[in-house]
Image: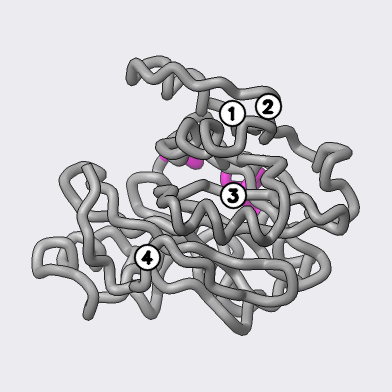
Amino acid sequence: MTTTSTGYEPLDTLKPVSGDVWLVDGPAIRFYGMPFSTRATIVRLASGALWVHSPTRLSQALAADVAALGQVAHLVAPNWIHYAYIADWQARFPGAVAWAAPGVAARAAKRGMSLRFDHALGQEAPGAWDGEIDQMIVRGSEIHREAVFFHRATRTLILTDLIENFEPAKLGFWFRLATRIGGIQDPDGTMPRDMRATFRDRAALKRDLERMIGWAPARVIVAHGRWYQTDGVAELQRAFRWVLQG
């Protein structure tokens, strides 16, 4: 179920990030009864093809604006709970290739959704975007296996749920309370506590976080809440201090 207002209006609209990177704020989706704002990231590759991370609601106007940027070539479902609008984008852009992180296809099938995924995302970038976007599947959890991406040209790190950063002023009372208890409230958003509990192999997680920090991101985009337009490395060190300083 979607809700309208998120605090990140205008929705379904291309918003420039840096260079050939844009984001789209979508409507909120209710998850465990709470309204989670949504966000897609679009990268235009050197070939002119478009790479779409965690696609959000696709309106006719947005589809036209996206098509004006280039040909949609890749649709990315980055973790097991971010795939809801893949089919809508496939219908509008039938030539696009769909990529799924571990667990996505099984989760969709379990929920009775018939989705087509063409390729699985792996630990390294495929040839389609190798050299432009680095990637890895963050290790440490058998449940939450998220693919993360780093756009080299703009030094933009693209995460999904590994950090959530909800702004309290944009939330109702109960969700404001829940995000504070869950450790996912701005200005100190981090990994949700329930997700954190699934990362049993902290050493593996720490190694992958150190690799992300080694990419030296200038900014960090997250799917839920305020994203980090500056100080990317410092924000990673802050958000994951519970691992990095352990």
Q: What residue type is labelled 4?
A: Leu
Q: Where is residue 19 in the image (x, y as percent from the top left)?
A: 74, 75
Lower position in the chain sequence, tag 4 or tag 1: 4
Q: Which mark is residue 11?
A: 4
Q: Mark 1 points at which residue?
A: 102
Q: Which amino acid does label 1 sit on?
A: Pro
User: Which residue is drawn at the image coordinates 42% and 61% (left, top)?
Assistant: 12
The kind of secondary structure element at disc 4 is loop
Q: In the figure, is residue 32 to the left or right of 184?
A: left
Q: How far apart are marks 3 and 4 (CA)?
A: 16 Å
Q: Is residue 204 above or below residue 46?
A: above
Q: Can residue 197 be seen in this view?
A: yes
User: Which residue is drawn at the image coordinates 72% and 55% (left, top)?
Assistant: 70
Q: Mark 2 points at which residue?
A: 120
* Quarter of the figure with residue 159: bottom right
* Quarter of the figure with residue 157: bottom right
Q: Can residue 200 be seen in this view?
A: no
The nearer-to-camera label among 3 and 2 is: 3
Q: Where is residue 110 in the image (x, y as percent from the top left)?
A: 37, 16
Q: Name the residue under label 3.
A: 53
Q: Answer few, some or many: residues within 10 Å of disc 1's Cα (few below 14, many 20 plus, some between 14 and 19).
A: many
Lower position in the chain sequence, tag 3 or tag 4: 4
